[in-house]
Amino acid sequence: MRRGVRFGMSSIARGLVAASAALVLASCGDDEPTPPGGGPDGNGEGELFMVHSAVETNGSRMNYFTLVDSLGEARTLDYAKSLELPGRPRLYAAQGVGFFAIGSGESPTITRYEVKDGALVAGASVSFQAQGVRSLGAQAVLFVSATKAYYKDTAQAQIIVWNPQEMVIEKTLPLPAELVKQGYVTGMSQWASRDGEAFFSVGWSSTTYDAVLPGTVLVRIDTATDALTWTQDDRCRDLTKTLRQGDTLYFFSGVINGLGYAVKGTHEAGQQDCFLRISSGKKAFDSDFVGTVSKALDDKHVGFVITVSEDGTAWLQVADKTITPTAPGTTYSEWYSKGWSWWKVPFASLTTAATRVQGDPGAYSSFTLTSGSNFFVSQSSSDYSTSTLMDLSTGAPKPTVSFPGFVLDVSRIR
């Protein structure tokens, strides 16, 4: 029996959703967990954010989409006032588009939303079912403009081009069939884009998410013509997080690569953390550059870059191997469960010793968000029963918004 959508009794819950969209988020690691100062914004209205969080119990996930007028104030979210959706729905947003969209957790359907008179109002929908999509991916959408968006479909090795204003599909762009490898899970990085072009990398993990194959394929799209090109690179793997600095793009290896490296220690399962760069004007990874943060950490720690803040600080998620399970046979849920903390190091000098951010080690969480002069990360308890957004802008971590479960996305919608 299909589960219905339940709303609390507030004015937020009596509508359905929306937004005048937003500052994009980084998520809690592309769906990884499985085991804010308000004020005038220049338009006579205060800030407004959408928080997408989730609670998982025995493999069953319930998601909550909650409007928050400030990320800078200490508070606990009241899920009675949230839009509640089962499964794995997705929040898709981009700055300047004028709305956000939610992908259904039970079908490959995306619905656009707007905020009107303080209520969440659902608009038109588009389904990708006819294109063979069975479920929607985290961070799979890139909004090129108000009338053009891309959806990257890992299972079908294709890009779906759709119009988010009219909510219609315009065409599909097939990717090389060999990007889908039998017996492995195909993964695609976050989008990275700059004027006239968009990129993502492709990698492959074991079906148990405890090893990743060597190498990656970088896909480039000319956003004016939709022409596709791709290049193979064997230096890094599991490139998941991306970063744009000016017109330079970076791709950083992720948590599954770290698991393979820490537990199995073989080149077939993982490698030391690794990142690649696309310089301004280039269409492929720079052949003379490979980065790593391994020299900023000692032998007891395994870490990788999650993002770089505007002040040039690289923020790392780091596992303490004296706490985080690394014995042979460690599963990915065990790997995520404990011993993780945030560390920082100047991005320009990754041989400098990294320093740990104050706070008790907990579960893995790769969420970060920049809002104005504030920089937030998420800290989660070992069982993901609770999470808190921490403002790291003023030196000592400042706890702000707390909630049951873990954070997936946050977007500024006003």
Image (cartoon, helix red, strand yellow):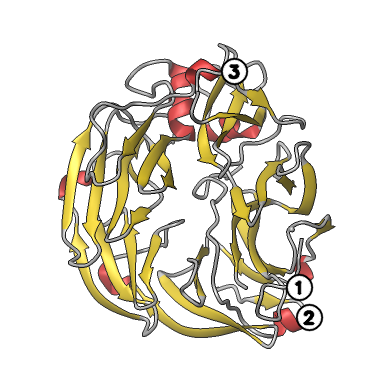
Near mark 1 (Cα within 10 A), the count class, few <14, some 14-19 or many ≥20, is some
Is residue 132 found left or right of 89 in the rendered image? Answer: left
Which numbered disc covers residue 353? 3
Name the residue that disc number 2 marks.
10
Do labels 1 and 2 touch, CB within 8 Å?
yes
Instruction: Report x, y in % for residue 393.
Output: 71, 44
Q: Amino acid at mark 3?
A: Ala
Q: Determine whether the residue tagged by mark 2 lies in a helix, strand or loop.
A: loop
Q: Quote the CA–CA distance across marks 3 and 2.
A: 49 Å
Q: Quadrant of residue 227?
A: bottom left
Q: Name the residue rendered at 34%, 26% in the picture.
A: 290
Q: Quadrant of the C terminus?
A: bottom right
Q: Is residue 328 visible?
A: no
Name the residue that disc number 1 marks.
81
411 to 357, vertically: above or below = below
Earlier residue among tags 3 and 1? 1
Is residue 140 found left or right of 61 in the rendered image? Answer: left
Earlier residue among tags 3 and 2? 2
140 to 28, vertically: above or below = below
Q: Name the residue rendered at 31%, 60% in the picture.
A: 195
Near mark 3 (Cα within 10 A), the count class, few <14, some 14-19 or many ≥20, is some
Instruction: Report x, y in % for residue 389.
Output: 72, 49
Q: Amino acid at mark 2?
A: Ser
Q: Determine whether the residue tagged by mark 1 lies in a helix, strand or loop.
A: helix
